[in-house]
Structure formats: C-alpha cells, structure tokens
Image (cartoon, coloured by chain):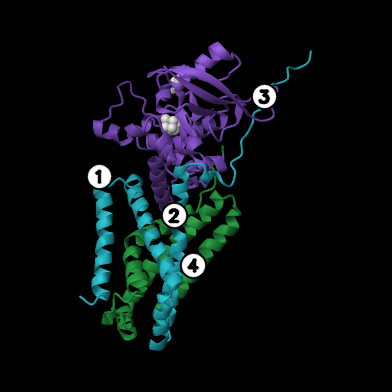
Amino acid sequence: MSSPKRSDEPIWWALFSAGGVCFAVFLPGLILALGLLWPLGLLNSAWLQHDKILTLLQSGYGVTGLAFAAAVICLPLFHAAHRIHHGLHDLKFGFSQASKLLCYGLALLLSLLALVLVVAV
Amino acid sequence: MSEYQLLLQRYDPEHDNEPRQQRFTVQGEHTTSVLDALLYVQQQLDPTLGLRWSCRMAICGSCGIMVNGIPKLGCKTFLRDYHAEILIEPLAHFAVEKDLIVDMTQFLAHLSAVKPYLINDYSGTQPHKQTPAQLAKYQQFSNCINCGLCYSACPQFGLNPEFLGPAAITLAQRYNLDSRDNGKAARMPQLNAKNGAWGCTFVGFCSDVCPKQLDPAAAVNQAKVESAKDFIISMFKP
Amino acid sequence: MSTPVSARKPYQPKLGRSWWLKHNYYRLYMLREATVLPLLFFLGCLLYGLYCLTQGAAHWQSFQLFMQQGWVIALNLLAFAASLFHAKTFFALFPRVMPLAPAWLMISGQWLATLLVAAGLLLLFGGWL
Ligand code: SF4
Ligand code: FES
C-alpha cells in the first residue's frame, strides 16, 4: 500500500496556534484599552498622543513596532484565516484549494500591509 | 416500574427506501438499560427488530446506538436517566444495514490502516519488560473497545468518511508511545496526511461520548504535534 | 444455478449543512470558531489606525473619532467578549494538546498572562506608568 501524501497543514497549524495564543493573551487587554476605554474617554495618557505612539513604536530601532504588528495583527490574522478555511469546510462550502488560497493569501497580504505600515510610521 | 415510549428508527432493506420511525411502549425500573428495553421489544413485541449486542457490560463495544441524538452504549445507558419518550437511532455517520445495525467496515479499515500492533525485532523468550512509568505513557489510550461512538460524535468523519478518525489515531498514538514498539516511522505517513491527524478541528465531542474516557480528542491533537515534528525533521532530510 | 442475490441495501445518511445546529456541543464549537469574525473587525481597526498614524496627527484625531462611533464601539465590545470566550476555550485545550504540567496549573497560568497584559496596557494608557 502506498502511503498518502504528506499534508502541509503543520505550517498553517503552527501559525494558527501561535496566533491563538496571541489572540487569547494580548487581544483582550488591547481591545479593552483601544477599542472600548479609549473611545469612551476613560483613558487619556500622553502615550495615546500621535507623537508618543510613534516614539513607542519606533523604540528599540523599530523592533517594538514590528513585534507589536506580528503579535497583535499578523499572527491573529493567520489564526482567523485557519478557522475560516476550516469553517467553510464545516459548512460544506469546501472548495478546499480555493478557500485555502483565499484565506491564507489574504492573511499574508494584510500581514505585509501591517509590517509596511509600522515601518513607515 | 415506569412506562417509557421508545421511538425506534427502523429500516428494512428489503422493503424500505429510507428509515422510518416506530413507537413501542416498555416498562422500566431503576436498573433497566436501553439495551434491556430493546431486547424486550425484540423478544416480546417485534422479533424482526435488528440490533447488535453481546456482553451487556460495556466491554465488547457492539451495542452502540444514538439515544436522543447522542452516541451511547445501549448497555451502559439507563431508562431512569430519560423522560417518558426516548428516540433511538443507529450510530450516526455510518451506513445503516438494518434497523439499528450499521456497517462498520470503514471504521475497521481505518483502525487497521495505522498498524495497531507492536512492531519491533524483539525475538527473545523472556518477557518484554516495561516500567510503570513506561506503561503510564500510553495506558489511557489503550482502553479502547472499538465501539465507534467517537466516529458518530465526529462531524469531520461525517463530512469526510476518509478521515481516519478519533479511535484510529488514538490507537496509533497508543502504539507510538509504547516503549516496546519501533513502528512509529511506519505509522507516521498515515497521521501526516490530510485525512490523518490533520482532518481534525478539535470539536472535542468524541472525548465526551467515549464510554472508556480515553480522551481521543487529546490523542488526535497530540498526534498533530508529533506530525508537526515529523514535518520539521523531513525538511532536513534529503 | 443462479448466483444468490445479496439482499443488502445499506442506507447512507448524508450530513446536511446545518448539522451544527442540532446539538448544543456543536453550537458552542461553531461559536468558538466564529470568534475570529469580530476579531477580524478589530484587526481592521488596528490596520486603519496604523495607516492614520503614518498620515500625521490630524489623521490620528480622525481615527479616534472613528473609534468613538456607537457601532464601532458595539462591534469592539463583541470582539472583547469573543476574545474572552476564545481564551477560555483555547486555554482549556492547550494542556490536552501538550500536557506539560497539571491542567489547572496551565490554565490558571495562561489567565494570569492575559490579566498581566491587560493590566500593563491599562496602566500605560491610563497614564499611571
Ligand atoms: S476511543 Fe472511545 S468512543 Fe472511540 S471507539 Fe474507542 S472506546 Fe469507543
Ligand atoms: S453489549 Fe457489549 S458493550 Fe454493550
């Protein structure tokens, strides 16, 4: 009996898992701060001013900004892409190759956009 | 004694094109299992009822059915835990042969695909010894009775019958973790495939329904970790 | 002599698209998978915020106005709830995939990490740091 083809899932699963940790550990606090309390006017330290945020992101030769983008944008994007790709299969919209290309392709594009933006600030 | 209504799914391949339901009234006391009730129906009310069973003590794994939509062993499920009406169907996701009897061929093929036996070149006549710690590594995963309940709980198997499924992957882990076994390399190709460990999305219901508490979902996801390691190693091999 | 004809006619049930509505366990599974939808909205906000940062202080002001709209706050409230539900499920699965320590210890350790990150961010942006 010939053995079946090796799946490339380990790559996507590793990104999914890393993204899942980031989503669970970093995102609750970040959404609470930037998505809820700041817009409601409950947080207004100088660190939320335009120039201060720039200093924050550029600190450590820009590594802070890149790490920030990777941890709270890129990896969570791949986490979401993985769940949507498999969710489509669960709902029997399983054009597996097409949905895979679309989901991970978009995650990759948006991740690159995030990295370009933090470098540009 | 209390009265229960059993709503049985019936299917007679010689007359029916699809399953239908039939209602039976049975009496039950504290110790009446669903299997007891089904056997009462078969022996006293309708001898044409088809069902599988053997040990009546949750060890042979042949009496799996859906009780109110949840996979259960008929002999380990009791009328007392239900209200007056109980819906009984054959195990989900499998092809129905007759009434409550399903075709397990695919399930058995998946089990044997992972080479579920010790592979080694040990040929001594002395017992092949193992320490308690070595035993503990796989013991939990070795209690499977091949009842197939986990396959009926698994939507990924329902969506894609090629998926190896919880029990088979758990069995592969059981042998891969055994200190007396050297067959991991022969088993990994099955686990590495898209229908191997990677067919799972950790729904987790299989672990809920397993009558032997193997936690097959954990085994499958530990197999993903093993497959990911195997993936990395393969990148460094020519 | 004719060969005997098999009376077999197995009935193969098909799993419909709505299988996950049939049982509470499956509904919770789908809810877990769906937590990424509000997450995507918040990630979109972050990307928009980064873009505004690159465009100068005035744009940053308009980003704040964008985030203050009722519907944006409502969706981010949903994203916050989703992140907590995701955390609850993810933390519980982790010790089963990698049993490195007793499950209760791994689960509480992960919650502690989430709590510390949240506290750090609130201290920083609240002006106490
Ligand atoms: S893992 Fe559990 S549910 Fe699955 S076949 Fe074995 S005993 Fe049955
Ligand atoms: S009859 Fe043997 S497991 Fe139920």
* View extreme (left): residue: C128
Q: Residue at x 36, y 48 (%)?
A: C93
**Mark 4: C-beta under 8 Å from nearest atom of ligand 1:** no
Given the image, on which type of amino acid does mark 4 rest?
A: Leu
Dots 1 and 3: beta carbons under 8 Å? no
Residue named by callout 2 = A13
Q: Residue at x 26, y 70 (%)?
A: C122
**Mark 1: C-beta under 8 Å from nearest atom of ligand 1:** no
C81 versus C100 height, above or below: below
Marks 3 & 4 on one chain: no
* View extreme (right): residue: C1
- Which numbered mark, 2 or 3, is in the foreground of this view? 3
Within 10 Å of disc 3 (Cα), the crowding (few <14, some 14-19, many 20+) is: some
Q: Colour of chain B?
A: purple
Which element type, helix, strand or loop, lies under badge 4? helix
**Which chain did the renderer colour green?**
A
Quadrant of the rendered structure where residue B33 is?
top left
- Which numbered mark, 2 or 1, is in the foreground of this view? 1
Q: Quadrant of ligand 1?
A: top left
Within 10 Å of disc 1 (Cα), the crowding (few <14, some 14-19, many 20+) is: few
Marks 2 & 1 on one chain: no
Image coords of residue A17 (percent x, y): 39, 56
Image coords of residue B225 (percent x, y): 39, 48
Which element type, helix, strand or loop, lies under badge 2? helix
Give the chain of mark 2.
Answer: A
Residue named by callout 3 = B13
Which element type, helix, strand or loop, lies under badge 3? loop
